[in-house]
Amino acid sequence: MTLRLPGPGGATRPYEPRTEPLSLTTGAPLTSRVVFSAAHVVADPYADVSPDSPAAVDWDATLAFRRHLWSHGLGVAEAMDTAQRGMGLDWAGAAELIRRSAAEAQAVGGRIACGVGTDQLAPGDRTTAEVRTAYEEQLAVCEESGAQAILMASRALCAAAKSPDDYLDVYGHLLRQAREPVILHWLGPMFDPALEGYWGSSDLDAATRTFLDVIAAHPDKVDGIKVSLLDAQREIDLRRRLPDGVRCYTGDDFNYPELIAGDDRGFSHALLGIFDPLGPLAAEAVRRLDTGDTEGFRALLDPTVDLSRHLFQAPTRYYKTGVVFLAWLAGHQSHFTMVGGLQSARSLPHLARAYELADGLGLFPDPALAESRMKHLLSVQGVAQ
């Protein structure tokens, strides 16, 4: 069957869906890289809520998706940007998500790290002391669940901090009291405009110096850093300046194959939102890297970059819509509904192109199901087939 896929301006183009998926199976644990997939949440489609309501989560489907990721040897980065923190998922929902997912991880032996932020604070003027207290509350929930902590960038701290010293003070306090080494997360303003000027400066060189000062003061409390600036060379330069034993986890959804493959001076591990839809393929690629087959790794992963760049195109923060859309087409959930109503955040032509790219990669375990669901969506939107 040929689908008619819409493009900008109302024109349609023919597309012949593939009939067989890429053959991928679960396999041995990953050894050469630590790889986390930042996982999305599945909304409850029957909840009578509005976009401003607290998130209504389908817990069974949400946890089933995490088991899917663990089954392929991936770690789960929980309650992160991909789970719509600050874009539909509030702290109450995130805290429950952390507790439930951490318990599930312990039950199946899966690796998990969870986002710790300050999003329980209502908008408004805050002191750095209030920001620190909010971080402490979330850190306690994460640690009590048995998960590793990811100290996420804080909108409240960005607004409250008057100088780089405020970042050094807040992060230093948190690192001193953390039970186990944490992951520090630098999320760029392309993902969240409210984080412009994080680490005390919009000059990225100056911000990098402050970031490195935080790590240098407490290297034993930093497992690694997650860098989400979509600048491959800056990430390479930064990882070369890290203390021994501190990992760099790429969060660059534009340049991840080359960053994970690395060079003769090092490589990046991974903590990526794009590894939500790419999970099985990404795991298979890293297994090739485990055997020293860098060419095989790149041969599998390089062709996925077009899809990732499409999903993460500006405004980048709405990439979650494409991620959940592909999870629906892949059969990981029964509907295309998102918390906060964000299923409407991308256009039909954008979603159609995402389907075309993902299908071309063989990402759908059941191509016929994906084709049927895509056809129904097009029909509802008035695209004749």
Image (cartoon, helix red, strand yellow):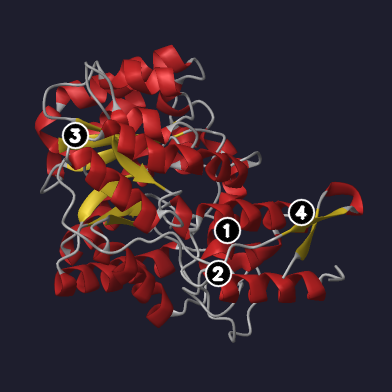
Viewer-nearest of discs 4 and 2: 2
Residue type at mark 4 is Pro
Asked whether the beta carbons under mark 1 and mark 2 sit within 8 Å of each other, the answer is: yes
Q: Position of residue 175 (x, y in %)?
A: 18, 38
Instruction: Report how far apart the C-alphas of labels 4 and 2 lie in the structure.
Output: 20 Å
Looking at the rendered structure, the secondary structure element under dot 3 is loop
User: What is the count of numbered marks?
Assistant: 4
Which residue is at the front of the view, 153 or 112? 112
Viewer-nearest of discs 3 and 4: 3
Residue drawn 83% across the image and 71% down it: 385
- Tell me the tag on residue 197: none
On the question of residue 127 being in view, the answer is: no
Residue type at mark 1 is Asp
The answer to which image quadrant residue 23 occupies is bottom left
Q: Earlier in the sequence, mark 1 or mark 3?
A: 3
Which residue is at the front of the view, 338 or 313? 313
